[in-house]
Image (cartoon, grey):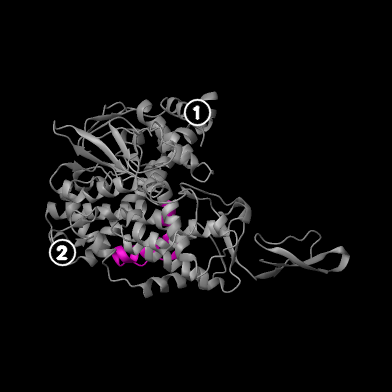
Amino acid sequence: MPYKTHVPVVFVIALVIQSWCSVAGYVNSSAIAGTPLLRKVTMPDSSSSRVTRRLGSVLSWFAVNIGSLLIDAAPITMFGTTFTVDNYQREMIDFLVAGRSDDNGVAMRDWYLKGTGEGDIKAGVVRAGPGPNTKTHLGFNDVEQLLTEYPSKILDGSIERGNELGMQVLGSGAWPEAPGGLKTIGLGQTRENHAFVRPYLANALDKGGWSDAWLQQMANVFFDNRDQFDSSDVAWWVLQVLHKIHLDLDIDEAQAKEFTAYMSKIITLIPFTENALNGWAVEQALSVKDTLSKKAAYLESIKSAMKTKYADEDFVKSSSDDAAAKLNLLASNILDSLQFAGGISVPTVINTVLATTHMATESKHTSLKNEPLSTSNYLWILLEALRKYAPVAGVPSWEKKGDGNYKHVVPNLAQALMDSSVFDQPLVFKNRGADVYESKLLKTGMPWAGPAIQRFSDGTADTAAPHSHNCPAQDLSFRMMKAFIEAFIAKGGSSGWSAVDAASISVTAYGPSSFGVVKKGLTHTTGCAFSPSCKPGYSWVSTEYCWWGRRDWTCRVV
């Protein structure tokens, strides 16, 4: 029947695209309804060029209108502002289309500049939207100043955080455990709940007992007896490291791969509410019950590890309801950290460095065409990747106005790092020099929302302070990236690595396409065959003739 025939197409557009928007909006990676448990959110119960921009708008109109026939498209009202299909979802699908354009970031820049009258990101540029009552701040200094004010304004109650990830307003359905009494991502927790969680996260991550030597050892172990790997393998290595640091929990390769597979499922649920996820069509498309069942099992595993790691804490020793609630709150936040933060952003940046340096020569940035990845250049390439392909986009908040209403304010890190008044030729990938990277990236911590760290009257700052809102793994994540890339270079030796599918590698605002790499110099023989062929990534070197017209090829990675 036609209805059944077109359901998969609808979901590719209306479900998968919307879920991808949620990933991409954060990791620069919806039919969203509501829940009574979502703070200050009320919901109805009903379950590069102008041509490119117009084309994207046609796609978004088609997606949201066709998708609304099958899923609950009720509007969200968050802090008094209502987000609908027409005023929000269409624009966010245009965001997805722009970000996936392989045009060196032109379409993404133009999407952000829509309605501003500007041709480049520059100081003071502010975009209306996405969505009503929303201002997205794009200039470097503007974004830095807004983030600097987060700790004090959150402390005095003049701003609050909502159930959002990057540029995306989220649904409640992916948090049935209701951490802290709220069905929300950890980033959207109340001031009080965040103040409880933050010290535990930051003290485990940036202030934990790990060392550079240990990180390097973990990276070296990954490359032991490994002469080839896929870009997807980086994610499970990252997860092994993060499980150990978060929870002192050792997981093997199989367990890490299983968690990676789960991550690819849970991320597709976050745009949707409970009502939407309970619908037959969404369940069939996204395997909702199975994914949430796996999430529940991971939460129990995390709680078990926490009871060992934090055995002396009151929330572990006590049997009270309050202690159980705190255990649940912290476990949910740790899981969010693993599955939506470092577990996505760290491998994305590492793979961006590998992709930009190993894609086909004609596809490379000019600065990398004759620049093999090495110990002498990897640091500037990594820092430039963090700038041009920033792993985090928006850090949204809701600012309380004098009349008691709220306005939606979105400082955008990714575009701040493309500010033409700060970075010459921001679309160009090039070595900007140690002074620029030190002052604008490392000292400010801008790729990690660094200015949002809580500072005290004596001028000191502490990432583990209750009201810090920078990435709690700001230092750790950068050192993990360096450790993996250094191990990659060392394993490649003087010859280096070759991409199996170099010609098909691309990098967009949302990160690189999938690819594989093989160590150069490896050889294999095909054995006698009438039609021999080399393994992927290998090239023919010589032929030895066998009987009855068969040939035995020698193949090498070059």
Image coords of residue 399 (percent x, y): 20, 39
Foreground residue, 277 or 139?
139
Task: Check the picture and name the quadrant holding the C terminus.
Answer: bottom right
The residues bearing labels 1 and 2 have C-alpha atoms spaced at a distance of: 56 Å
235 within the magenta span: no
Q: In this view, does 40 lie above or below 540?
A: above
Left or right side of 363 for 211:
left
Q: In this view, does 270 lie above or below 336?
A: above
Image coords of residue 522 (percent x, y): 65, 70
Foreground residue, 505 or 75?
505
Q: Please identify the dominant SS of the magenta region.
A: helix
Q: Which residue is identified by label 1?
A: 54
Image coords of residue 133 (percent x, y): 27, 31
Residue range corresponding to the magenta coloring: 239-262
Amino acid type, residue under disc 1 in the picture? Arg
Location of residue 157 (image quadrant): top left
Image coords of residue 468 (percent x, y): 22, 55
In the rendered structure, find residue 520 and report the number of the disc placed on it.
none
Left or right side of 183 for 381:
right
